[in-house]
């Protein structure tokens, strides 16, 4: 595709300086592109840098974090100008549904007033017009418009989650970042929310990044997914490719570790735990847990290489197989 | 007002009335359980006879049984009669109003200073969390919080005694003069004790406000507000302070409630003729009616302001009634 991607993350690095002078590299060279109407899953274990990645793209990390790389919206770089250059884009172009979105409303103000607030701030609408829009947004996510005058504690968990999505859509953003938007909800509500996100991407042409550790969620809602490990992308491709034609042992093991209701395959677990990010990683970060590591894995870090049409993976095995084939 | 709110309000009012009654009873029992009595103190004259002691006891109604005394006390209280001071024979009510009119401006000024500066430094140190300003303000607050009040008062006397008056409310030799110069003189006398009160309260305010603000700063809705593109100052005002207000309002209400209790230590160090000093002297001379009266006023004031704080928090946080 030649067209400029709507949302582009290039070589994103995030590191924290620790009090003892060492550095913790939470995100290491993450890149991905996103077009309108696309839903990209960002999958991986806890602590693999998913949340840090998307917080960094909005410039929302605490000041103790150092960030390098490029974030482009429609080709325009937004991070390099600092807080002043990101702020106008926030919520206007790129909005977010947070992890624990249930607590994203201030308890002392009505839900409606908090949905209206960014509209006024970014000059989208004000007064009665803004309130009418807030009501419409709430109805879109299945909440009666009259509930806008109620306080967050009067909503159920699922309602608050949906209201958070309505709030994220207040300024008609082009990009929606959703960080574990269904965690802690029961399966029925979870399905409703995923369906809602997918249909919003479809009808509004929204580009969605869906962060989750839950593979069935990815399978249900995403067209493409990036598998993250130790702050890096291990493999990125269409959900079909990842499932049926994975080119990274981690992806394969991750899918094998997901229980299947109908199949009678044994659920496997991946032994060991991810490497510590406050130490320099030599070679492939996954090699110690990998079931097919080779000698090279200990010395050289694998780079992302194309293994299919718009399907990349970072594993030495692919390169070896490619060499043999040639 | 829905039924749940009404329920909450009635419950708080009922609870307040209960508290006042319990404290009234405690006040009665407490002073009579103390060693010594008014009579032993008053009759500490040479050659006091059993007859004199008996006469005194009868005069002050101490000859009756404790139960009788208790019911007389409650009955007179209902009529607004706080009794007569054993020491100067004047109605307790008269003594207390004089003391209160001295205490309220001084302790009030000190409390106000503590509230203003304490909130400012609490918010500033939380906002500059783990940066030099935070360390400076927090450590200063902890220091003032831990200094004993009387020591702090004596330090003020030592350091500023050269520039400002350190005892009493007025210059006893400044006879005549205009009302204006009299008021100015009182104000000059008020500065050091008021500052002592302010410094003792300042540390507590800073620490409570700081932790309340820090707690809110870590909330998801603050991050969400940043993501919405709201400027930092607006977030601080609209989200952080608004949500940190609850513990701060309670603290303010409580310290205003304690204003009428005077500041016993500060008033004693600076011989400020307020209610704190009166309580101190009444304890020494077993002046039950004065003590009962002073404690009654303190109780009523603290309970009332607690009630006000509860009702305010209802207004500030819709979750309170739930």
Image: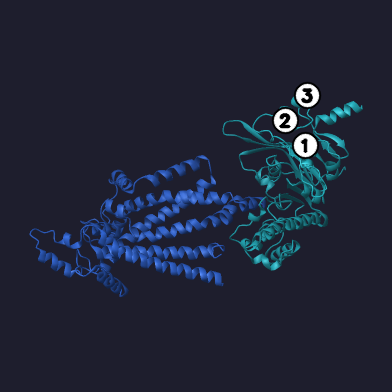
Chain colours: A cyan, B blue
Residues A293 and A78: in front is A293
Q: Position of residue B37 (x, y in %)?
A: 20, 61
Tag 1 subunit? A
What residue is disc 3 on?
A: A295
Task: Mark 3 vs mark 2: tell me if same chain.
Answer: yes
Whichever of labels 1 and 2 marks the residue nearer the N terminus, that label is 1
Quadrant where the C terminus of chain A sits is top right
- Mark 3 near mark 1, Cβ–Cβ under 8 Å? no
Q: Is residue B113 left or right of residue B101?
A: right
What residue is disc 1 on?
A: A250
Q: Residues within 10 Å of mark 1 (few under 14, many from 20)?
A: many
Residues B176 and A37: in front is A37
Task: Mark 3 vs mark 1: tell me if same chain.
Answer: yes
Tag 2 subunit? A
User: Quadrant location of residue A42?
Assistant: top right
Tag 3 subunit? A
Q: Position of residue B26 (x, y in %)?
A: 32, 63
Q: Residues within 10 Å of mark 2 (few under 14, many from 20)?
A: some
Q: Is residue A65 left or right of residue A261?
A: left
- Residue A288, labelled with which disc? 2
Q: Position of residue B165 (x, y in %)?
A: 27, 51
Whichever of labels 3 and 2 marks the residue nearer the N terminus, that label is 2
Q: Residues within 10 Å of mark 3 (few under 14, many from 20)?
A: few
């Amino acid at each position: 595709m030649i067209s400029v991607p709507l949302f582009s993350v290039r070589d994103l690095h995030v590191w924290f300086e620790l009090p003892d002078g060492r550095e913790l590299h939470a995100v290491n060279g993450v890149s991905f592109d996103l077009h309108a109407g696309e839903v990209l899953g960002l999958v991986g274990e806890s602590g693999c840098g998913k949340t840090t990645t998307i917080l960094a793209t909005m410039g929302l990390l605490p000041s103790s974090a150092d960030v390098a790389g490029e974030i482009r919206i429609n080709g325009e770089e937004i991070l390099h100008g600092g807080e002043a250059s990101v702020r106008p884009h926030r919520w206007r172009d790129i909005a977010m549904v947070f992890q624990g979105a249930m607590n994203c409303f201030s308890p002392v103000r009505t839900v409606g007033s908090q949905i209206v607030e960014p509209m006024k701030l970014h000059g989208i609408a004000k007064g009665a017009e803004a309130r009418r829009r807030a009501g419409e947004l709430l109805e879109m996510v299945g909440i009666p418009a009259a509930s806008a005058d109620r306080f967050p504690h009067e909503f159920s968990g699922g309602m608050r989650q949906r209201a958070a999505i309505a709030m994220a859509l207040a300024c008609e953003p082009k990009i929606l970042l959703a960080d574990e938007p269904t965690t802690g909800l029961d399966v029925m509500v979870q399905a409703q929310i995923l369906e809602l996100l997918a249909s919003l991407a479809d009808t509004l042409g929204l580009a969605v990044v869906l962060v989750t550790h839950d593979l069935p969620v990815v399978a249900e809602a995403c067209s493409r997914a990036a598998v993250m490990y130790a702050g890096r992308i291990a493999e990125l491709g269409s959900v079909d490719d990842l499932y049926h034609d994975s080119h990274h042992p981690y992806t394969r093991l991750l899918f094998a570790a997901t229980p299947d209701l109908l199949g009678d395959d044994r659920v496997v677990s991946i032994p060991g735990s991810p490497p510590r990010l406050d130490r320099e990683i030599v070679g492939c970060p996954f090699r110690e847990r990998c079931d097919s590591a080779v000698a090279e894995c200990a010395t050289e870090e694998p780079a992302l290489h194309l293994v299919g049409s718009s399907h990349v993976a970072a594993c030495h095995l692919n390169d070896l197989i490619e060499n043999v084939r040639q | 007002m829905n039924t749940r709110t009404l329920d909450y309000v009635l419950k708080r009012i009922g609870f307040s009335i209960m508290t006042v009654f319990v404290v009234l009873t405690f006040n009665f029992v407490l002073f009579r359980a103390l060693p010594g009595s008014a009579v032993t103190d008053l009759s500490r004259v040479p050659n006091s006879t059993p007859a004199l002691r008996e006469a005194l006891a009868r005069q002050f109604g101490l000859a009756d049984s404790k139960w009788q005394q208790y019911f007389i006390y409650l009955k007179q209280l209902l009529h607004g009669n706080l009794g007569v001071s054993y020491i100067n024979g004047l109605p307790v009510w008269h003594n207390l109003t004089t003391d209160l009119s001295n205490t309220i401006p001084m302790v009030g000024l000190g409390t106000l200073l503590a509230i203003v500066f304490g909130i400012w430094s609490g918010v500033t140190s939380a906002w500059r969390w783990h940066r030099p300003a935070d360390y400076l303000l927090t450590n200063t607050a902890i220091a003032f919080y831990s200094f004993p009040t009387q020591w702090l008062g004596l330090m003020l006397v030592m350091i500023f005694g050269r520039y400002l008056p350190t005892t009493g409310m007025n210059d006893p030799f400044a006879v005549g003069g205009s009302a204006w110069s009299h008021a100015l003189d009182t104000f000059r006398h008020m500065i050091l004790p008021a500052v002592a009160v302010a410094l003792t309260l300042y540390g507590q305010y800073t620490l409570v406000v700081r932790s309340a603000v820090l707690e809110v700063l870590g909330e998801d809705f603050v991050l969400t507000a940043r993501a919405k593109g709201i400027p930092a100052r607006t977030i601080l005002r609209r989200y952080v302070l608004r949500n940190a207000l609850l513990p701060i309002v309670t603290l303010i209400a409580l310290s205003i409630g304690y204003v009428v209790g005077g500041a016993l230590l500060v008033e004693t160090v600076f011989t400020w003729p307020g209610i704190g000093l009166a309580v101190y002297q009444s304890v020494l001379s077993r002046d039950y009616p004065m003590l009962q009266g002073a404690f009654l006023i303190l109780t009523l004031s603290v309970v009332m302001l607690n009630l006000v704080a509860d009702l305010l928090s209802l207004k500030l946080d819709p979750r309170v009634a739930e």
